[in-house]
Amino acid sequence: MQPVRLLRELIALPSVNPAFVPADDPAAGEKRVADFLATHAASLGLDVRRQPVLPARENVLITLRPSGRTRRRVLLAPHLDTVGATASQLKPTVRNGRLHGRGACDTKGSIAAMFAALAATARGGRRPAETEIVLAAFVDEENEQRGSRALAASKLQADLAIVGEPTGLKVVTAHKGNLWLRLETRGKAAHGARPDLGRNAALEMARIVQLLETEYASALRCRRHPVLGHATISVGTIAGGTQPNIVPDRCTIHADRRTLPGETEAGVRREIQALLRLHGLQARVADSKSAPCWPMETDPELPLVRQFMNCAGQRAPVGAHYFCDASVLSHAGIPSVVFGPGDIAQAHTADEWISLRQLDAATAMLTRFLRRLP
């Protein structure tokens, strides 16, 4: 099965995460892509199982069983959902060696490469003797990772998960965590003509924003990881007050804090609170995500990780700044890496595209790895 043809068909099937569109949007949901993969997998004689996650939203688990007794398991784990798509973005177009369309690199390109590699292994007469290969295609990665969290909760064990994301064909062994913080200051309302009778919550917050974006950000730059660089913070939203002639009694910001392996959500909250106290400032600090997004780090010297890196022609590990399903699987005890064709810089853009050369190369690397499994 040619990955280019497969990817064209996948792009034409809308699978927009329902969190990003109205409830009745015809492009919402991953079901069309899930059904497409299940049908093609069944035609190849592969085992297909659905894992319910949310109403009308299911993970698809496609399994190639070994010729003998199962002694290990490898997961290929891309995600089915995309961000919002226009009608033109659902029409795959090839130009100058690139395939354009929503999901081309994030992550239908990974789906196409992984499915094609699995199909080639199943049909090529080189089925592993002791290793079960499972293509686990997840729903909801773009929002709350409920697909990978459902698989983790099922207690399925594996010796390696290769999580599909656009990495430019690099095997990523570590990525940052993603903590969203909500900070709120409280003041005292007063008439704008007598601000001296009130206490301006926005002014207090302005001082906090200045502190986070300068002194705190500078301190984080000294906290470095060998492949991930330093931790970061970015204040993304601010809101406060009701109208110009009322001193605001409340102000809220949301900040994006990228964490390194070893950092915890509770630890980050404590250090920010301590910094505020040191400067005589006060705010309520809380997490604003519904589920934790931990950093991920996998030992590159694990035998299967090293074997896959060798198949990709890579000697040294690399890291990624973004968060993905690899964290969820790793936290559940499955050693995980991130790999796929495409560049993260193209993901979520109006003109998303993937290099066809990279798509073919990813398929070849994955096929080589799967065929060499014991």
Image: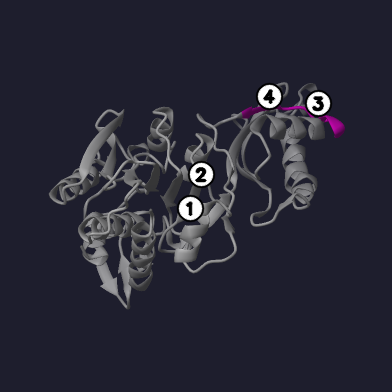
Could you tell me the amino acid type at mark 4?
A: Asp
Where residue 88 sits in the image (x, y, percent)?
Answer: 25, 60
* Mark 3 element type: helix
Q: Residues within 10 Å of mark 1 (few under 14, many from 20)?
A: some
* Residue identifier under label 4: 249
Where residue 256 sits in the image (x, y, percent)?
Answer: 61, 42
Marks 4, 2: nearer the viewer: 2
Up-down relation of residue 186 to residue 315 (above or below): above
Alpha carbon separation for disc pair 3 and 1: 67 Å
Marks 3, 1: nearer the viewer: 1
Marks 2, 1: nearer the viewer: 1
Span highlighted in magenta in the image: 277-286
* Residue identifier under label 1: 304
Horizontal side, residue 261 vs residue 172: left or right:
right
* Mark 1 element type: helix
Alpha carbon separation for disc pair 2 and 1: 9 Å
Where residue 343 sits in the image (x, y, percent)?
Answer: 45, 63
Could you tell me the amino acid type at mark 2?
A: Pro
